[in-house]
């Protein structure tokens, strides 16, 4: 392995015995050994901090979560762990609220990710034209990314408010009446999705734009020589070239959707936010975890929720993989 | 939008023209330069609509923060900023420990950014330019960690922090975020292209050891990418909500935590909450206005070949 790149050793002139004193030769040997050690150990030393920090604060807690999930641990006495076996899992799996949270997470994930990525694709296509002030447009579209979940959720909470909300004012103005957004089964999920879409569309747009600009222009020239319209070029050249990037954004957005927390927590705030609405109509898994662990103070069930999330993530990954395999097979 | 944009090309004499246009010389380095079509008015209208949509909530934050709550929630809401901004900022400042929260946010974000830059540049350099056993597998491991949501480990993390005596302290937010997989990946991408092997070899011939090479060659070469990664990391650390909200408390919050608590308080005044939101967003908006172009470029360069 070391021979494939020229290393420093290759350039050290071979000791010419006749001209060198033994002391010099020994020093040189020692030095070259030191250098070799430096070469061997340095890469590991450079990547070590990442793995140490991740191991200590990522991997170890992840596994430890499984252990805690089998115990009774209360917020009031963190150092007292009492073995309860599968009770915590039993508890959450028989809790209707848990399944509501699973469904909500899934539904909100879909209705926030799909439109977001479609709009991002369209916007990236527009930005890929030669435009005046293109940097300006890119920056404006990315601005929501600079806003925190908390501020975004709070300002949208004001917009979606039932009484005196800006959106209801607009709807009333055009004669469409009055909606209690946060109370509705679907309207509350839409409200949360809007916050997600607002914050992340610009980011995904730029990722798509970067991928579009990397598509070789010969492909488009060949397509237009064959008489392909712009729409056909977009479908037959742009989209296939972007497939890895699209997959990447789908994976990232799916993981993001699993984590939705601030948006539902702050939509109405307070105790209503901690249970994801009066009837848990917009409670996500993260909010459910927070509610059990930090609001009610039972860390055992909260840990069980974490492992349920891991299981869900693995199922999604497996489904993704299967779909990917199926698509690849049917494409051949 | 996706549907309509390509059909809006009645000036479709264009494809023929592109076909005859000889590929430009440097198009090898700037792919796509040859095929760029002029955007029609539709593109500008669509971008303007999206742009207004992007900025409107921020404008509404300002409007709401500068009126009384009754005015904001009135049957006809105000559309221009009012004169109560200072009063509301002051109230938010006093109600939610915002002064302390700003300092905390700066400390947390700066520490995380500095550590991330240092460690990720080192690791990125190792993955980009050094050969060692297990390199491919370890890099795959780094990327896989991107897919693990923090939710999975917060419960034991909370208990660990309490054991370490960091419960409710800034350390509990800083330490778990000292490195980032994205940062390692980003620096590796950049350095594998921007740093020629010749430069490293020349330094080796001159007798520099590995750490010397990092200090005098890798860091200067990596500077542009470090600027971008630094800004992205700072934005992310500043805006982080989930773990800080669980780990910190009312007495010692970051800005986002303080904001969350302000809104969770009993019957919050919406104008004051919006003033708090403005305080938490403003520093980043300023950064964004100044460095927006670089951040845009950074996200785009980090994404290619992702």
Image (spheres, helix red, strand yellow):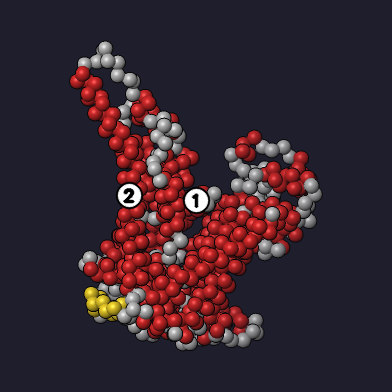
Q: Residue at x 56, y 81 (%)?
A: A187
Does A33 sit left or right of A275 as displayed? left
Quadrant housing the N terminus of chain B: bottom right
Residue under label 1, please give it: B302
Does B302 sit left or right of B227 as displayed? right
Quick one: B36 or B91, which is closer to the camera?
A: B36
Q: Residue at x 54, y 71 (%)?
A: A109
Q: Position of residue B74 (x, y in %)?
A: 50, 84
> Which structural element holds mark 1?
helix
Chain bearing tag 1 is: B
Q: Residue at x 43, y 49 (%)?
A: B137
The quadrant holding residue A221 is top right
Quick one: A89 or B180, which is closer to the camera?
A: A89
Checking the image for residue B256, the label placed there is none
Checking the image for residue A48, the label placed there is 2
Q: Are marks 1 and 2 on the same chain?
A: no
Using a 10 Å C-alpha cutoff, classify the residue at mark 1 as few (fewer than 14 neighbours), some (14 to 19) or many (20 or more).
many
Instruction: Report the Cα–Cα distance between label 1 and label 2.
Output: 23 Å
Residue B290 appears in the picture as rendered: no
């Amino acid at each position: 392995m070391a021979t494939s790149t020229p290393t420093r050793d290759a350039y050290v002139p071979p000791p010419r015995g006749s001209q060198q004193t033994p002391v010099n030769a020994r020093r040189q040997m020692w030095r070259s050994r030191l250098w070799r050690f430096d070469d061997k150990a340095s890469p590991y030393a450079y990547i070590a901090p990442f793995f140490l920090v991740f191991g200590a604060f990522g991997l170890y807690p992840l596994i430890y979560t499984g252990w805690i999930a089998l115990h009774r641990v209360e917020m009031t006495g963190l150092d007292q762990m009492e073995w309860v076996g599968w009770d915590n899992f039993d508890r959450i799996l028989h809790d209707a609220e848990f399944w509501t949270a699973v469904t909500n997470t899934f539904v909100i994930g879909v209705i926030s990710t799909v439109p977001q990525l479609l709009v991002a694709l369209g916007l990236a296509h527009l930005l890929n034209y030669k435009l005046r002030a293109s940097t300006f447009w890119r920056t404006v579209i990315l601005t929501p990314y600079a806003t925190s979940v908390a501020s975004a959720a709070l300002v949208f909470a004001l917009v979606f408010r039932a009484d005196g909300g800006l959106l209801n004012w607009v709807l009333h103005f055009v004669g469409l009446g009055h909606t209690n957004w946060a109370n509705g089964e679907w309207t509350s999920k839409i409200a949360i999705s809007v916050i997600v879409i607002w914050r992340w569309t610009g980011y995904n747009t730029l990722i798509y734009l970067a991928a579009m600009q990397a598509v070789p222009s010969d492909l488009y020239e060949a397509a237009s020589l064959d008489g392909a319209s712009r729409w056909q070029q977009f479908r037959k050249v742009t989209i296939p070239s972007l497939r890895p990037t699209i997959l990447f954004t789908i994976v990232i957005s799916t993981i993001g959707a699993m984590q939705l927390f601030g948006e539902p927590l702050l939509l109405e705030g307070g105790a209503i936010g901690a249970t994801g609405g009066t009837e848990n109509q917009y409670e996500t898994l993260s909010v459910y975890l927070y509610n059990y662990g930090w609001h009610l103070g039972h860390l055992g069930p909260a840990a069980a929720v974490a492992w349920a999330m891991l299981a869900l993530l693995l199922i999604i990954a497996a489904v993704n993989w299967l779909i990917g395999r199926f698509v690849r097979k049917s494409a051949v | 939008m996706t549907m309509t944009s390509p059909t809006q090309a009645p000036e479709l004499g264009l494809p023929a023209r592109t076909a005859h246009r000889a590929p430009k010389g440097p198009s090898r380095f700037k792919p796509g330069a040859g095929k760029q079509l002029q955007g029609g008015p539709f593109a500008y209208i669509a971008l303007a609509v999206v742009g207004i949509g992007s900025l409107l909530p921020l404008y509404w934050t300002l409007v709401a923060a500068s009126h009384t709550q009754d005015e904001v929630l009135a049957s006809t809401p105000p559309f221009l900023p009012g004169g109560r901004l200072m009063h509301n900022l002051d109230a938010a400042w006093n109600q939610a420990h915002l002064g302390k929260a700003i300092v905390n946010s700066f400390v947390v974000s700066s520490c995380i950014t500095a550590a991330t830059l240092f460690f990720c540049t080192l690791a990125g350099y190792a993955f980009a330019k050094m050969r060692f056993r297990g390199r491919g597998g370890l890099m795959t491991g780094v990327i896989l960690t991107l897919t693990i949501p923090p939710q999975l480990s917060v419960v034991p993390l909370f208990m660990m922090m309490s054991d370490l005596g960091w419960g409710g302290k800034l350390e509990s937010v800083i330490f778990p975020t000292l490195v980032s997989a994205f940062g390692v990946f980003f620096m590796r991408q950049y350095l594998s292209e921007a740093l020629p092997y010749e430069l490293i070899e020349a330094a080796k011939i001159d007798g520099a050891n590995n750490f010397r090479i990092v200090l005098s060659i890798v860091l200067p070469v990596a500077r542009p990418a470090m600027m971008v990664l630094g800004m992205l990391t700072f934005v992310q650390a500043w805006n982080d909500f989930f773990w800080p909200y669980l780990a910190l408390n009312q007495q010692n919050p970051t800005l986002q935590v303080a904001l969350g608590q302000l809104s969770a308080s009993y019957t919050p005044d919406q104008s004051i909450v919006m003033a708090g939101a403005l305080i938490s967003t403003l520093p980043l908006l300023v950064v964004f206005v100044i460095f927006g172009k670089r951040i845009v470029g950074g996200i785009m360069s980090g994404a290619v070949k992702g």
